[in-house]
Image: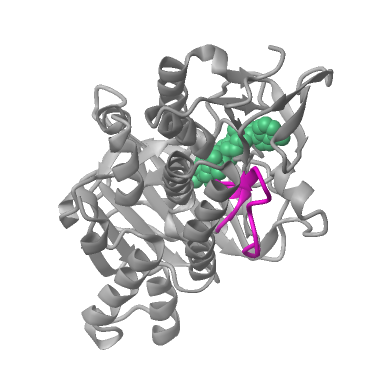
Amino acid sequence: MAMAPREDVLIIGGGIGGLTLALMLHQRGIPCRVFEAAPELKPLGVGINLLPHAMKELAALGLEPQLARLGVLTAEAAFFNRFGQLIYKEPLGRAAGYDWPQISIHRADLHRTLWEAAAAALGGERLHLGWQCLGAEAGGTARFRRSDIGETLPPQRGRAVIGADGIHSTLRKQLYPDEGEPIYSGVNMWRGVTRWEPILGGATMIRCGWFTHAKIVIYPIQNHIDAAGRQLVNWVVEIETPKYERWNWARPGRLEDFIGPMQDWHFDWLDVPEFLRRAEVALEYPMVDKDPLPRWSFGRLTLLGDAAHPMYPRGSNGAGQAIVDARALADCLAAAGEPEAALAAYEAQRLEATAKVVRTNRTTPPDWILGEVHKRTGDKPFVSIDDVISRQELVAITDAYKRVAGYDREKLGR
Ligand SMILES: Cc1cc2nc3c(=O)[nH]c(=O)nc-3n(C[C@H](O)[C@H](O)[C@H](O)COP(=O)(O)OP(=O)(O)OC[C@H]3O[C@@H](n4cnc5c(N)ncnc54)[C@H](O)[C@@H]3O)c2cc1C
């Protein structure tokens, strides 16, 4: 390829946000190209959640049936203390009255679905693999090299350049060279998948324990993976510790580094140590984020998704906020004649909204319920949860988060 036509929007990064944006721009008749650094598509990552606000947007792209087939329609959230006692349960997705489901899915299945849909809609020649962006100018020009052999590729000039290049974003580093590395939360994570029989009915997202000892999040991401009707079940162990390795989505994790605090978690709903011992993949990743930025848009250049607002996964909102960003940006580009005005309007809609999610994920996301109960019980088993925390308080915690993250049922509408 020589130069992309000037009217093309250049999307840097073919991850979840970049591909969603490509599909949305195409739907609005705006030509675009995606430049992805990875030389080939690999099935990377483990589980990811698509909450109703994200599914509303993906359904508008016609992707709901396929995602529902590949993933699991999660119908319930359940919170337990580290003694396996139930604190709170609430319905999710359609079971909670939304017009869209919550889908828990392998990131590789979501990514492949978006990539194939974008290739079919835009034409595969508009999705460029192995193009690593080195930087971009506010005038709309981006520079590249081949990610495998380092050879310089021709610069591309487009209507706008969108940095959807994830938590390690080159474009964010260019705009904020002094920002430094992502900020460690003090909690390290180990993520993986285990083939297991359905737990609590097979459609429940479980959160159990608290960071100071150990917390585990468990949810299924594939149904009927064998004749015994087992599921592929995603898990994330989160433990407070000053020790962590640099973030890398593919770093292998070692069972002995995290199973210790859960050795005696033999609950009637799950034998946690046995479940973890039978894991087929374990990855280690520190819980990190970055402080919200004062500005994303500079002329014809802006940021989107993790490049703009990396956040803790405590609210299951990383993918969702990237998808909502894509919708806002596609609408702004369709509405405004000048790309500069569109990018400024997009920033005005999304910067503060996502900054609130970043901040709330640090303080009071849904799992704050577990922290409150841990504090009020002095990390001891309770006799009755009603003596510890009222149902109204529990509902108020999760409802407040839904409003911040943009999936309050009344507001989300149809
Ligand atoms: C390999 C991988 C595995 C992941 N696994 C999980 C997981 O298991 N669970 C989970 O919740 N989240 C995971 N994530 C993160 C999750 O996808 C994002 O938090 C979220 O979906 C927001 O999407 P995004 O498009 O902003 O970023 P991402 O989905 O991270 O996409 C960013 C894309 O930009 C590309 N890129 C980076 N730098 C350049 C460059 N200079 N030039 C061109 N392209 C570039 C990357 O290769 C990547 O494809 C993973 C991300 C990656 C890249």
**Residue at x 51%, y 54% (from the top left corner):** 345
Note whether residue 246 is visible.
Answer: no
Q: Quadrant of ligand 1?
A: top right
Residue 114: image location, x then y, percent:
43, 28
Q: Position of residue 100 (x, y in %)?
A: 23, 45
Q: Quadrant of the N terminus?
A: top right
Magenta-span inclusion, residue 316: no
Q: Would you place residue 190 above or below residue 395 in this image?
A: above
Work out whether residue 374 or residue 169 is closer to the camera in this orientation and state it: 169
Asked if residue 1 lies left or right of residue 118, the reply is: right
Residue found 71% across the figure and 49% down from its top: 172
As for residue 304 lying within the magenta part, the answer is: yes
Residue extent of the magenta highlight: 291-311
Q: Position of residue 328 (x, y in %)?
A: 44, 48
Depth order, front residue of 335/144: 335
Please name the predominant secondary structure of the magenta segment in the image. Answer: loop
Measuring 48% from the left and 14% from the top, which residue is drawn there?
Answer: 123
Residue in front for this viewpoint, 358 or 138: 138
Q: Is residue 351 above or below residue 40?
A: below
Q: Can you say whether 106 is above or below 49 in the image?
A: above
